[in-house]
Amino acid sequence: MNIRKLYNAWGPTSLAVLLTASLSTPIYAQSSADTAEGPTPATEEALTSADQLAEQRELPRGHFRLPEEGDIIGEHYTVVVEDPEDTLIDIARRHNIGYEEIRMANPGVSMWVPGEGTEIVIPARYILPPAPREGVVVNLSELRLYYYPADNPGIVETYPVSVGREEFATPIGITRTTVKVKDPAWAPPASMRREAAARGEPAPSIVPAGPNNPLGRHAILLAMPSYLIHGTNRPEGVGMRVSRGCIRMFPEDIKSLYERMPTGTQVNLMDAPFKAGWAADGTLFVQSYPQLEENVGDFEPLLNAIERVSELAEDQAEVDYAQVKLAVENPDGRLIALYGPQAPAPAPVEEPVELDGLLEEIELTTATQAEEEA
């Protein structure tokens, strides 16, 4: 084995994961097709029909049927907190929602003590990212992964993820999955070991598999050296920018992908903070997320949004671009209907005042005042 060639090809983090796994257990793709169970809300006020919710509950966690027409999947709904010990993070995880998603959808609700009887919005309605619907698509600003399984073409899966924080930004580009590792070891990078030593907390060169391993129990290496899709031993941080560039998932979600996703699957790491798409009923929606500063460059958010909406609407819809501006300036992930059956009715236009009548009233008032003064 030529270690130097492997190091250059995989990078230090990936190589440490691969070598440790090869010394402990064989590396292979498990054939089990078991998937995590879907959420079971205790109380729901569905913003869709009962039939649609019933159909969704029949699918595994994170699975949605691809629309025959349009770009929208899922539905918003609400649940009522029944357990006073529940945090907003607990509720989010049960419903396949990440930290930032649940926080933005429920402003004013405490993350740690939402309180028994509090109604919680579950923002589980998404516009599919503007990318080819194949393999894995990770939309960095959205903090969400989409998977289009080749062996199940009518389905798209979506899960919340964590991505790299600003100083360790997750790169943009197209890559593929390579090796799957069960119970991986983790090699803290040199920068992290230096930081830990400066705090008087020297970090080990290798963290073995177990409850203290930040990679969790499953890791999928990418052809992009040192970057992985993996689990975590701190699931409360899923849905935030907290990693050192890797894609971090809930343990149950990465386990499901690990068991089913073929090696060599394409992975598209993209950044689309603004999305627009059509619903099956002809409603045009937009959805906006906080933009990652490192990917701004010459990007003009409002101009990009207007161009995207204009491209979709063409000449078939009259769009209120003030709503587009509102979405860009308030990037909270909320779907806004711009046009169509689900769009709010336009404000009534006040009838113009007839100038002749107004002049007559002014003349009459002036004449009356003159008579009274006389």
Image (cartoon, rainbow, N blue to C red):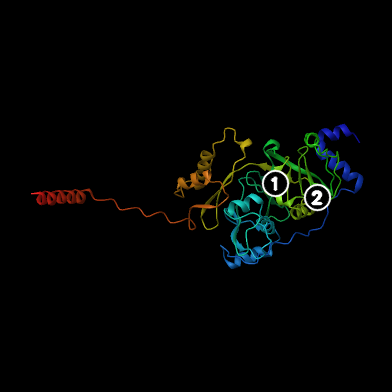
Residue at image x 50%, y 42%?
306
Left or right: residue 272 versus residue 30 is left
Q: Is residue 169 above or below residue 344?
A: above
Residue 162: image tag = 1
Q: Residue 202: which quarter of the image?
A: top right
**Residue corresponding to mark 2:** 218
Left or right: residue 125 versus residue 224 is left
Can residue 46 be seen at all in this image of the molecule? yes
Left or right: residue 287 versus residue 218 is left
Q: Residue 62 in the image: x percent, y percent?
A: 68, 57
Tell me the kind of residue under disc 1: Ser
Per the image, label 2 sits on a secondary structure element best described as: strand
Q: Residue 55 in the image: x percent, y percent?
A: 64, 65
From the viewer's side, name the closer residue of 154 and 121.
121
Q: Residue furthest left?
A: 374
Crowd class of label 1 (few under 14; some 14 to 19; many from 20; radius 10 Å)? many
Crowd class of label 2 (few under 14; some 14 to 19; many from 20; radius 10 Å)? many
Compute the Cα span from label 2 to label 1. Answer: 15 Å
Left or right: residue 338 versus residue 93 is left
Residue at image x 59%, y 67%?
50
Pair 2/1: label in front? 1
Q: Residue 351 in the image: x percent, y percent?
A: 30, 53
From the viewer's side, name the closer residue of 165 and 157.
165
- Closer to the chain start, of discs 2 and 1, is 1
Q: Residue 223 in the image: x percent, y percent?
A: 77, 39
